[in-house]
Image (spheres, rainbow, N blue to C red):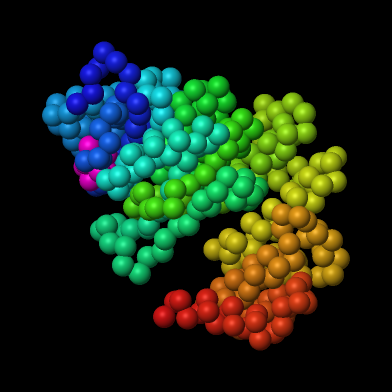
Amino acid sequence: MTDKNRSPRITVLMSVFNGEPYISESVRSILNQTFTDFEFLIIDDGSTDGTSKILERFSENDSRIRVLRQNNQGLIASLNLGLSLARGQFIARMDADDISLPRRLFEQVIYLEANPSIGLVGGQVAVIDESGSSHALKRLKFPTSARAARKKLHFGSPVAHPACMFRTRLAKSSGGYRSYFTHCEDYDLWLRISEKTETSNLKNTVLLYRVHDTNTSVMKRHLQIKGSLLAYIAYRYRRDGKPDPVESWSCIELQSLSSSCSDASLFSFVQIRMARMQIDDLSQDDYATALSLIPMSRLSLFESDIYTREELSRALIRVAFRACCASKYHLMVVFLLASIFFSPAVPIEAALQRFLALKSRTH
């Protein structure tokens, strides 16, 4: 058990609101870690179900657990409260519905101590369903080098938020989580942390990520996508020595923002990111929007050292696959042909092979 008179090496930080179905399994996965020098700081954000009683029982039996109860303030406010109270040298994030594998804390703290240039580390993630089964579900792969993680940062989070560990002083000096970026607060923080340090991931699986109907990532996907693009634009402003523009963004549309970008490369990149959002998120069957990417007049938008023709070709093949799944076969053919147009070096046989490989994974 951790001596409360001294600082632990790690603060495990969790915020929970009405987490009764999964909270016990999640808490046990932390208490059963092979690395034991930690405090477990849990912010009960106004739960109205049985969560509070469950946490009370756990805290009575394990002195490492600190439970703080508050009226519902939301995730960002809860995490910032946890940051302000954390006593550990490192902070390990944990969600109330996921499961940390037993060696997670040990492997991550050893890695950070051995690599002082790395300030944020994650790991590989296995997806489980509501019952905890991983059968036929995917694994989420994250970059395992600082260079690959920095490249990934241009398009989204290089680490899984509930699977990461970072240096406490670094998160605090970067300003913590910002309320403007609801549903993508982690990505905004990683971008600001990246201005001071490097990021990477362990090669091992460290977390079982539970997917269910009430996941924020399931319910708020569109807000996450738009918010992450705004976070990236703010990052580019700071990188170019300009003031952080977030305070002036009370309400703004992405399209008007992209057209107002004075920097040509940033303008192109915003357009590329918006196009990628439209390609990668077809939950509303917005095929007409994705089709607008194909004409020759848009080709110049994809001349980028980050987003290549080859990557666009692969994205269009994914769209063709989704069109096929939706029985929109005429669009499937259009997207397959478009994928070849954007990457002439890729013969039609190779495009079809990629498409069939995607199709075979669903059977």
In terms of depth relative to the viewer, which is nearer, 72 or 246? 246
In this picture, residue 263 sits left or right of residue 196: right
Residue 215 location (% of width, % of height): 40, 49
Determine the residue positioned at 21% across, 41% down: 32
Verify whether residue 28 appears in magenta. Answer: yes
Compared with 315, 274 (above or below) is above
Where is residue 237? Give x, y as percent.
74, 34
Q: Looking at the picture, does residue 155 appear above or below residue 63?
A: below
Residue 155 in the magenta stretch? The answer is no
Question: What is the number of callouts on the image?
Answer: 0
Across and down, in percent, residue 318 comes to 59, 71
**Residues shaded magenta:** 23-31
* Nearer to us in this view, 132 or 205: 205
Please provide percent x and percent y for residue 229: 65, 45
| Residue 98 in sight | yes
Which residue appears at 77% of the width and 28% of the height? 242
Above or below: residue 354 compared with residue 237: below
> To which quarter of the image does residue 164 belong?
top left
Residue shown at 65% from the left, 70% from the top = 314
Q: Quadrant for residue 312, please give it.
A: bottom right
- Residue nearer the viewer, 331 or 209: 209
Residue at coordinates 35% horizontally, 69% vertically from top-left?
A: 136
Lateral position of residue 36 relative to residue 185, left or right: left
Q: Can the viewer see residue 56?
A: no
Direction bottom: furthest residue: 349
